[in-house]
Amino acid sequence: MLQDNDVVSLKHGIPAQESAPLPGVEAVDLNAGAIGAIVAVYDTGTSEPEYEVEFVRDDGSTLALITVKESAIERVEG
């Protein structure tokens, strides 16, 4: 199971309409391989937890904050 602050990457792209943008943050498409950090872990009571992941731009500003299932992401080792 992944944990808060783990760095992860998307296994597949997520279109903008599936992301929940923050106020003042434009919805964007997230491409496979996008890097983000887990900011919350949700125990869904199923075998697959969900994670709130913040994706950021190179300058550190928030690109998207979305909830994804564990099967959509993988830990970035390093």
Image (spheres, rainbow, N blue to C red):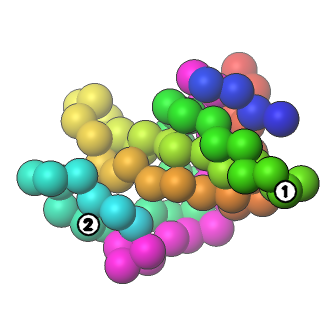
Secondary structure of the residue carrying tag 2 is loop
Q: Quadrant of the N terminus?
A: top right
Compared with 2, 30 (above or below) is below
Crowd tier of the residue under label 1, counting other residues whose Cα lies within 10 Å: few below 14, some 14–19, many 20 or above: few
31 or 3, nearer to the observer: 3
Residue 17 sits above or below residue 77 on the image: below
Mark 1, residue position: 46
**Percent x, y of residue 56:** 35, 40
Answer with the quarter of the image where residue 40 lies. top right
Residue at left offset 26%, top offset 66%: 27
The residue most toward the left is: 24
Residue on which the image places disc 2? 27
Q: State which region is magenta.
A: 5-18
Asked whether the residues under the numbered discs 1 and 2 touch, taking CB atoms below 8 Å apart as contact, a structural biologist would say no
Front residue of 21/58: it is 21
Amino acid beneath label 2: Ala
